[in-house]
Amino acid sequence: MNVIDSLKESISAYEDGHWTRALVTGEEAKQEAEKKGKHTYEALLWYGKFNLDLWYIKVAEELVAVASTITDKKLEIDFADGRYDIEFLAAELKAKKRHFQEAIEEAESILQSRMAKEDASGLKVAAALQAIGQIYLDANRFVEAESALRRALVIRGNKLGKEHLLYAETLNSLGMTYSAQQEYVRAQPFCKLALNIREKLLPPNHLLIAFSLHENAKLKLHAFRVSEAEAFWRRALTIAESELPASHPKISQIMSGLASALLTDYQYAAAREFYERALTAAEAAYPQRVADVFVAASGLGAACLADHKFEQAEPLIRRALSLLKEYDELQYSNESALVENLITSQMLQGKVIDAMSLFPDQMRARHTGNFARTIKRLEMLVNFIQLNLPDEVARDLDKFTEQFGKNKRR
């Protein structure tokens, strides 16, 4: 089998959702290309793509670096519909390494070049817009992401129809854009339609279906449809674990999602188990995937708290708070809820003064949505403590709350 045929075999495996098999056959194609001295550039990029999608970032980086030194950059495998576009591989690699500005500049340069050479409403331009939109989304630049993705959606809908996998890809990305901004009602129709298209056109164990199930499960949980969310996440996890390495970010994200549904359903032990597994998976991709570590650590802390494991909860909540303060990308997280969980864990360990001292922090926390609720919670805790603690501790608390009340009036 020649190099191009080997590459086509690996791409076919990738297209079928068998990414691990694509990686194996992609490596064989690369070795064959290097041995024969033909199509090496193309083989390196495709093998790099498979590694990147499986989050073997260092390997992908090395492959892209070698490919950049090759003078003959001819590509024989070209998808006119933009289904797979390895020209953006270097930009996608930079984005995964969180070098977003470099990634955006490189991707925009490719887009401008295409628009100068091709039809501005062509499918190759749509592919570029899709790639750029995803990079903007990963960078939390939602306005630019929505603009690029909506342009891609119009082109793909017009050229391919509204029951095509590429149309579904852009729908899913748009839904993720709204979901990331907590605009769950806006996200729902995009994610639902993407899942419907994928389930209609793909086999039931395809990775793209797992990814869509994950996005839809998040929206079902926010709509308080807990049992449906749990079922979706369990289906997604079964598919993902069969095709992805245990350290892949999607594994962590799906496990954290499933754990959140179990926690909402008061299944505390099961929730802790999946959060622990999610945290282990997330740490393998840190610091490229800070958000996954944050979600797993804060979720595990909440599950421990709900399960009355207060000593275990406190360091997890503190870790989540430290990540929140260190990384701007977590700006949409609820700092106030984390501080409240920390207060509760300390209270229930008997660390009363430490807990009370956190209330001013909670009042200053980002996304403190209900000040009256915070004050009421403080008053309830003080009343409880005064009834259950020795007189000398209660007197100290009286002094603290008196001072806290003065600060509040200011």
Image: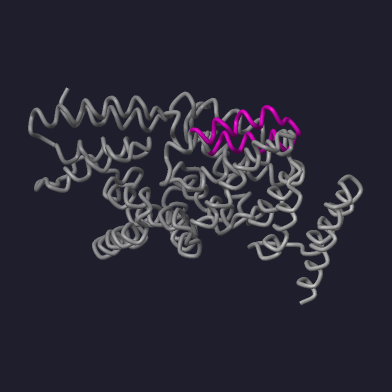
Residue 373 x/y as whole percent? 81, 59
Residue 260 x/y as whole percent? 66, 38
| Image-based side of 266 in relation to 81, left or right | right
Membership of 255 in magenta stretch:
yes
The part of the chain drawn in magenta is 253-280
- Residue at the far right: name it: 387
In this view of the protein, which residue sits in the foreground, 326 or 386? 386
Our reading of the magenta stretch's main secondary structure is: helix
Q: Residue 278, relative to residue 82: is it above or below?
A: above
In this view of the protein, which residue sits in the foreground, 274 or 203? 274
Residue 212 x/y as whole percent? 54, 39
Membership of 107 in magenta stretch:
no
In this view of the protein, which residue sits in the foreground, 377 or 149? 377
* Quadrant of the rendering where the N terminus is positioned: top left
In this view of the protein, which residue sits in the foreground, 62 or 118? 62
Residue 80 x/y as whole percent? 30, 47
Q: Residue 19, relative to residue 293: is it above or below?
A: above
| Image-based side of 151 in relation to 95, left or right | right
> Would you identify the image quadrant in which residue 269 lies?
top right
The colour mode here is one colour
Q: What residue lies at 35% left-to-right and 60% top-to-bottom?
A: 104
| Image-based side of 217 in relation to 108, left or right | right
* Quadrant of the rendering where the C terminus is positioned: bottom right
Q: How many marks?
A: 0
| Image-based side of 222 in relation to 84, left or right | right
Q: What residue lies at 69% left-to-right and 33% top-to-bottom?
A: 262
- Residue at the far bottom: name it: 410
Q: Residue 342, relative to residue 281: is it above or below?
A: below
